[in-house]
Image (cartoon, grey):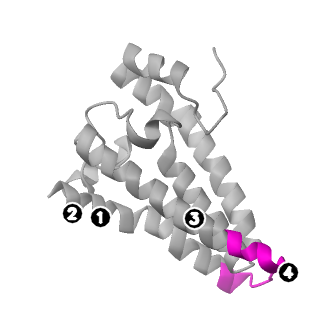
């Protein structure tokens, strides 16, 4: 049942953010970029982003015993499950505290390059900024309250994003 809930969450949340919304932007603002062969990097970014998300979601299921559901989605737990009860620090979580967000943003930016769409590129940049604020102001304080010292030690050992350490308070 947990796997089914993770699949439903993936379709509803990241699926909307990474597939439906970019298509909507592409229809509304179809201006294309002329980036030539660089567009093929987009396909690699989409594949890498998908794999980042998938491996992270599997780690949540196996190590954490939960789905990628965010803590404020508790009213929907019957449908999409709940956040992991344990801190997940294995798999890609050894290199970045937010591989799912990185995966989704990489996928969206990859779409922008592959389809050469300026609107999707702007959306991808705005999406990363929104994710950053969600992580800094909502998720990290929540996890510090929930996981305590274990999460604080994890934060000091693993960067928030790849290669970028979080600022110490």
Mark 2 — residue?
A: 4
Q: Quadrant of residue 163?
A: top right
For the N terminus, the quadrant is: bottom left
Mark 4 — residue?
A: 34
Residue name at image x 35 percent, y 35 percent: 88
Cβ atoms at labels 4 and 2 below 8 Å apart:
no
Residue name at image x 29 percent, y 49 percent: 67
Query: 72 or 151, which is in the foreground?
Result: 151
Spatial separation of the CA atoms under disc 4 and disc 2: 41 Å
Spatial separation of the CA atoms under disc 2 and disc 1: 5 Å
- Which is more foreground, mark 1 or mark 4? 4
Mark 1 — residue?
A: 7
Q: Quick check: can you spot residue 86?
A: yes
Badge 4 marks a residue whose secondary structure is loop
Of the residues under marks 4 and 3, which one precedes in the sequence? 4
Coordinates of residue 112 in the picture (x, y in percent): 69, 72
**Label 3 environment density (alpha carbons within 10 Å; few <14, some 14–19, many ≥20):** many
Mark 3 — residue?
A: 107
Coordinates of residue 73 in the picture (x, y in percent): 34, 49
Coordinates of residue 155 in the picture (x, y in percent): 51, 23
Q: Height in image: 48 above or below 92?
A: below
Cβ atoms at labels 2 and 1 below 8 Å apart:
yes
């Amino acid at each position: 049942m947990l796997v089914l809930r993770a699949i439903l969450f993936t379709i509803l949340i990241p699926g909307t953010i990474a597939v439906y919304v970019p298509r909507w932007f592409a229809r509304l603002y179809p201006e294309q970029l002329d980036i030539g062969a660089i567009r093929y990097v987009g396909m690699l970014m989409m594949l890498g982003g998908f794999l980042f998300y998938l491996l992270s979601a599997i780690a949540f299921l196996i190590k954490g015993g939960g789905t990628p559901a965010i803590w404020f989605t508790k009213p929907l737990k019957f449908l999409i499950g709940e956040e992991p009860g344990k801190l997940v620090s294995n798999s890609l979580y050894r290199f970045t505290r937010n591989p799912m967000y990185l995966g989704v943003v990489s996928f969206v930016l990859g779409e922008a390059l592959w389809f050469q769409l300026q609107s999707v590129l702007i959306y991808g940049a705005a999406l990363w900024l929104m994710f950053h604020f969600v992580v800094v102001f909502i998720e990290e304080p929540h996890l510090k309250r929930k996981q305590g010292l274990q999460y604080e030690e994890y934060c000091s050992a693993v960067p928030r994003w790849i290669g970028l350490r979080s600022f110490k308070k």
